[in-house]
Image: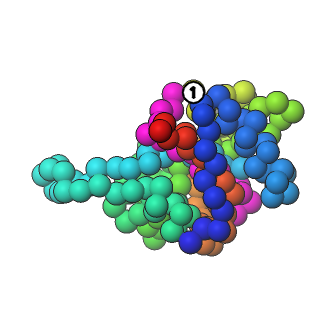
Amino acid sequence: MWPGSVIELDDWSEFASELRGALAAIGHDGLVLIRNFMLATCDVDDEMRPTGETDRLAQVLRTGTDRDGKSSMWNAPGHDFEHDLTPSGKTPADIIYAYVAELTETEYRVHYLPEGEPEEWDLTDQLTEFEGVLVYDAAKLDRVAKNEHWFRGDPRDALLAVFKLREEV
């Protein structure tokens, strides 16, 4: 199990300030990876018929990542490592698709292009109550493409924070 606790927000607009507080509390001041994920996903069979649901938040707390053996490899040219052209031996749970970010005085800046300038970008702008955000220590993953990162070890060791919206009562 991941030893941290989920940080609940009233609104996604609180993310940047709460991120700053969470990272300061654990003494992290390096680059991070920010990944949004669905809190629950529908499982389907080969004919795309629903067969159940996977609690992705529980998956994160157990393993450090929302991805498992059923997760897809994106393979988008120019954005991701092309596993179909150059097999890496990585399983879906060994990788994440995320944005590299650095904290600024008030927000965070995203390093979208590997050699480009960091830019202001609200990664939570379109998120809903059905999604969460994972924050990883970028030093514990290898960036192999613009958007794809490979864990160097146990994902739980790289996971710094988990955010979601507070459930309405």
Q: Quadrant of the N terminus?
A: bottom right
22 or 64, which is in the foreground? 22
Left or right: 134 as drawn, with respect to 129: right
Specify the segment rendered in magenta: 126-140
Left or right of 41: which side holds 60? Answer: right
Residue at position x 62%, y 39% in the image: 9
* Residue found at x 76% / y 49%: 22
Q: Give me the residue at 65% from left, 28% from top.
A: 13
Q: Which residue is mark 1?
A: 125
Q: Secondary structure at mark 1?
A: loop
Residue 156, relative to residue 13: is it above or below?
below
- Residue 33 % position (x, y): 66, 49
Q: Is residue 96 visible?
A: yes
Q: Identify the residue shown where x is 46% and y is 70%.
A: 89
Residue furthest front as drawn: 169
> For residue 122, which quarter of the picture?
top right
Q: Residue 80: x and y, percent?
A: 51, 48
Task: Indicate yes or no whether the magenta region holds residue 157.
Answer: no
Amino acid beneath label 1: Asp
Residue 131 among magenta residues = yes
